[in-house]
Image (cartoon, rainbow, N blue to C red):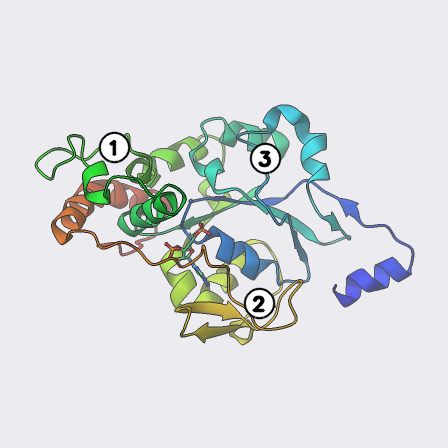
Amino acid sequence: ISPKYKFFREQGLRPERQLPSALIIGVKKGGTRALLEFIRIHPDVRAAGSEVHFFDKNYMKGFQWYRTRMPATLDGQLTIEKTPSYFITKEAPRRVQLMNPSTKLLVVVRDPVTRAISDYAQAISKKCDMKPFEQLVFVNGSIGSIIDTSWGPVKLGIYSRYLTRWLKFFPLSQLLFVSGERLVLDPAIELKRVQDFLGLKRVVTEKHFYFNSTKGFPCLFKSEGHSAPHCLGKTKGRSHPYVDPVVLQRLRNFYRPFNNHFYQMTGINFGWA
Ligand code: A3P
């Protein structure tokens, strides 16, 4: 609990729930949980802890319902929510615009090849009788055939396609693309960009992070609800299955034109091979 929050509570001022003014809309397996946990260290940020799935699954419940899912805030605090499936939900851009056309949108992106494997690693952890990645990636299950673009883990990596939909409703300046790779290598740099974009003071800095060599990821010294250093849970930073390098190359070649299109659209070269 921040000193400011405590102060207002002591003054008898009731915090109120607000609809979010910023959303982490994607992408699944990009590093969305890490970004949410890192930005919510900021005393002027309050976040919904779990994914609310409002703009995809719960939209019919209405904005009042959505608001009740949000944490209470004080004047000047920003409300944020993350549900990575928003990025790929057809109706989401229109719905978010309807809620508030000045909503700030954060998208964590990651090399689509690694992202696909991460997605598969998550799926297989829930359903162990899945076919190997190398089979699922191709239409006929073999390297000789074409890439199966209808398979979720592959399809989701065509970021330019989904971004096109968002840009029909929001100017590019209202979106911030966070590099999933840099969020691991140098979280403080990405957090600086995020805080600037959200109009926040630069409070979250390198001081908050340490690299945990057992986990292999940056972890936090302390954050909301934790007084001790801690890392994200076991489901974040899973080990990936071995994938045949020939298959990896086929996937890289497949994504190259889409990645280039995405770099053009965003004005950022993410450097995916
Ligand atoms: P892997 O589990 O494949 O390594 P999301 O939260 O969007 O589902 O993304 C999960 C991914 O976040 C993880 O994928 C991991 O690579 C990445 N990540 C980024 N920063 C992390 C951190 N500090 N700790 C753990 N995972 C992190």
Residue 204 - label: 2
Could you tell me the amino acid type at mark 1? Thr
Amino acid tagged 2? Val
SS assignment at label 1: loop
Frontmost of labels 1 and 3 is: 1
Q: Nearer the viewer, residue 260 or 145?
A: 145
* Among the two numbered marks 3 and 2 on one chain, the one whose residue lies closer to the N terminus: 3
- Residue at x 34%, y 45% (from the top left corner): 124
Please report the residue visible at 71 percent of the width from the left and 54 percent of the height from the top: 77
Residue 127, above or below 211: above
Q: Is residue 195 visible?
A: no
Question: Between 81 and 269, which is closer to the camera in this rendering?
Answer: 81
Residue assigned mark 1: 149
Q: Amino acid at mark 3?
A: Pro
Q: Of the two numbered discs 2 and 1 on the same chain, state the one appearing first in sequence.
A: 1
Give the residue drawn at x 74%, y 65%. Answer: 2
* In this picture, residue 15 sits left or right of residue 269: right
Element marked by disc 3: loop
Q: Is residue 82 visible?
A: yes
Judged from the image, the quadrant occupied by ligand 1 is: bottom left
- Tell me where residue 88 sits by quadrant: top left
Query: Which residue is identified by label 3?
Result: 101
Name the foreground residue: 155 vs 258: 155
